[in-house]
Image (spheres, helix red, strand yellow):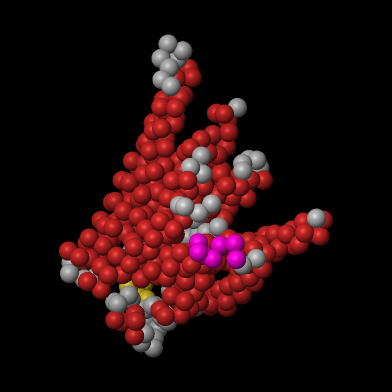
Amino acid sequence: MAGSFNLWLFAVSMAASALGGMLGMASGIFIVPILTIFGHVEIDTAVGASLVSVIACSCGGAAPFLKNRLTNIRLAIVLETATTTGALTGVVLAGIVPVSYLYLLFAVILFLSAHQMLARRRSPVLASAPAPACNWSDALELDSGYHDWELGREVTYRVHRVALGMVLMYGAGLISALLGIGSGVLKIPAMDTAMRLPIKVSSATSNFMIGVTAAASAAVYFIRGTIVTEVAGPVAFGSVLGAIVGARILLIVPNDKFRLLFIAVLVVLGIQMLLIVFGVHLSEVLR
Amino acid sequence: MNRAGWLEELLAAFLRYGSWSASAAIGLGYALALIGSHAPSWNPPVLFNMRIVRVGIALFILLPILRVLLMLLVFIRERDFRFAFIAGTVLAIILLGIFLGVPGT
């Protein structure tokens, strides 16, 4: 019994991390509902395990992205100041803002993001497009380039509107800390639409950043003893393997197909959030 | 470009070997548990196996934090003090978050 449950946790985490790692939103957003609904795991235990899974997914998938220069590490550390500050604000504000409004806000953001990302489909790689200078990007030397396997050449890109990106990252960190949901799903649309990064750079950079925010929360859970070894162990193990698979897929998948897959996931998650909103209201009515 | 490439290689190696070490600890814990359940003559206490798994989980949680610390040290060494300050800020916020989070319920 225990053995088969371990195997199930391992398999589920591997699949979730392959998808989440590839999309750059990590696995937490898939793992919590699966563990609670199908695995009958307590919500706290599921969140603790998912935090470990997010870290395993972020670290396990990082190497191939870094080696292919898809991850913009200078931009990542700059944006991490905003996401971690947002998460910290969320920790302080937790319990003050009604959660159902936040889910509604989250759903609206997801649908808007899906729309925006769909609109940017026509310009997948802004290779040599002369761009208006961004003061922050120049000052911090954030512009970079990577080798695109699909196009078979180097792609150089500029980082646009860093200040707007920072504000959106702060918001992403804040909302995700308040809801206990991974912020990758909000980070990528922000990088894509505000900062105009190539889609795979957004995904890889988000995947790199996600581990840091999750580690701060996971450390708190670990010290409090909310991380259950028997659940988190197989989940972490599966997540590392899944992340490696996901990273390999991202490197070879075409940009426009990847964008469409991401938009589809945004819409599905948005609908799921809306259901939670109505579920919350239903339970209040029933009470 | 070369300098940035060097840091990327370093971070890739750090995160790869870090993930492998943490996974190895978790795998070892479960391997010992599995052997223990099939060999009645050799049976280490279950808590011991789970403690190794727990070390692996702790290692995973430490990895991203150590990654920021590593970036901080590299930026200081490269005399890139702006980015050293940025990395130091991120590290401080993470530690403050842990400090504020632990006493809460």
Where residue B37 appears, x then y in whole percent?
49, 19
Residue A92 forms part of the magenta stretch: yes
Drawn side of residue B71 relative to residue A65, left or right: left
Furthest-front residue in this view:
B103
Q: Is residue B9 visible?
A: no
Q: Give the residue displayed 34% in from the left and 63% down from the top.
A: B92
Residue B13 forms part of the magenta stretch: no
Q: Give the residue displayed 63% in from the left and 70% down from the top.
A: A105
Drawn side of residue A193 relative to residue A106, left or right: left
User: On the image, which quarter does residue A144 sit in?
Assistant: bottom left
Q: Which residues are magenta?
A: A90-96
Where residue B8 appears, x then y in whole percent?
28, 60
Q: How many marks?
A: 0
Q: Is residue A237 visible?
A: yes
Where residue A149 appears, x then y in whole percent?
39, 63
Furthest-bottom residue in this view:
A132
Drawn side of residue A75 relative to residue B73, left or right: right
Of the 4 image quadrants, the one containing the C terminus of chain A is bottom right
Of the 4 image quadrants, the one containing the N terminus of chain A is top right
Q: Is residue A40 above or below residue A276?
A: above
Q: Give the residue displayed 44% in from the left and 27% down from the top.
A: B47
Furthest-top residue in this view:
B41
Where residue A46 appears, x then y in whole percent?
57, 46
Q: Return the residue nearer the eye: A244 or B10.
A: B10
Q: Give the residue displayed 39% in from the left and 60% down from the top.
A: B96
Q: Return the residue nearer the eye: A103 or B30.
A: A103
Q: Return the residue nearer the eye: A161 or B105.
A: B105
